[in-house]
Amino acid sequence: MMLLNTATAVPEMLIAGMACLILMVRLFDKSSRPNFNSFALSTVTLICAGLLAVVGGQPEQTVLAFNGAFIADSMSYVVKGFIAFISAAVFIYGARYNADHGYFKTEFYVLGLFGVVGMMIMASAAHLLTLYVGLELFSLSLYAMVAFFRDSRVASEAAIKYFILGGLASAILLYAMSLLYGLTGSLEIAEIAEKLALLESGNLGLTLAIVLVVVGLAFKLGAVPFHMWVPDVYQGSPTSVTAYLAAAPKIAAFAMVIRLLVDTLQIGHDQWQGMLIILALLS
């Protein structure tokens, strides 16, 4: 019997539903300021989702949903609250810039909302495929936001570089996930952790999977030496997009580190801890 527990994903469903609604409302909005209405609705949606996550959504114990693919725990709700509030602050902070430079459009805020949904899914992933779907939803939204000013060659170049290197990082993570599946026969994070604990120490496949996971995460975090995309993308993006890119996604990447390294690869703690120390010091 499939265990849904859809109440655990109310913030994600609220934002996704409102993103679709805002896009449709814009088509029929005949007021003098339709884009401002989209901005206001998007900001209010993020604030409401943040309140749902932080105030009304924290469970007393960990709850699994969607047949074990989604987890609701204290860490996920706190991360979701921060993502929603920070994204709302970025929308408000960048509103004047968007209005002055021609980015004050409904599509900008709809893409931002879908990016937030992807980040929230990453925070609650209890399954490697769920984690990857959230990562790609968030990444694809960002690729489009970076290239939002399509008449700018700098923005187009930044988007292409981000897309290519982001795709490379995703491929590396997928390869690491395939290795973990080969070692354990499962994609559920809790089950993977249990089966990895039974492996012999120094298993070559596990070591390779840990290295690939750390490399993929370092790409997404922009950590040395996998940071080559950061200067071009930050410079080429509209300032409001740069603010969005530099804020909430870092919290989502932290959640991804927890899910992949702490929850899944705890057995390899001695290996990935040293890698993270080196990356942190160099970065």
Image (cartoon, grey):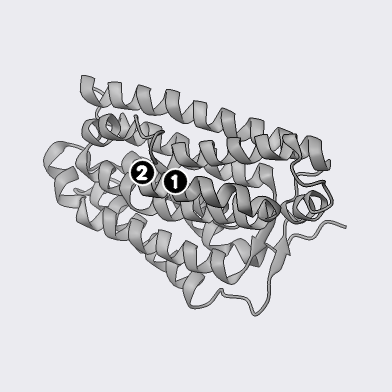
Describe the element under mark 2 as helix, strand or loop.
helix
Examine the image and state in which quarter residue 233 appears. Answer: top left
Q: Which residue is drawn at 39% across and 38% down?
A: 142
What quarter of the picture does the N terminus occupy? Answer: bottom right
Relative depth, front residue between 127 and 116: 127
Q: Which amino acid does label 2 sit on?
A: Leu
Callout 1 touching callout 2 (CB < 8 Å): yes
Q: Which residue is drawn at 63% across and 33% down?
A: 174
View extreme (right): residue = 1
Q: Is residue 55 visible?
A: yes
Which mark identifies residue 278?
A: 1
Q: Residue at x 65, y 46 (%)?
A: 130
Residue on which the image places disc 2 = 282
Q: How crowded is mark 2: few (under 14 residues within 10 Å), some or many (20 or more)?
A: few
| Residue 165 in picture, x, y percent from top left | 43, 26
Residue 183 vs residue 235: left or right?
right
Q: Is residue 43 visible?
A: no
| Residue 99 in picture, x, y percent from top left | 15, 44
Q: Residues within 10 Å of mark 1 (few under 14, many from 20)?
A: few
Which mark identifies residue 33?
A: none
What quarter of the picture does the C terminus occupy? Answer: top left
Q: Which residue is drawn at 71% across and 54% down?
A: 267
Q: Which amino acid does label 1 sit on?
A: Ile
- The answer for how far apart the CA atoms under marks 1 and 2 are is 6 Å
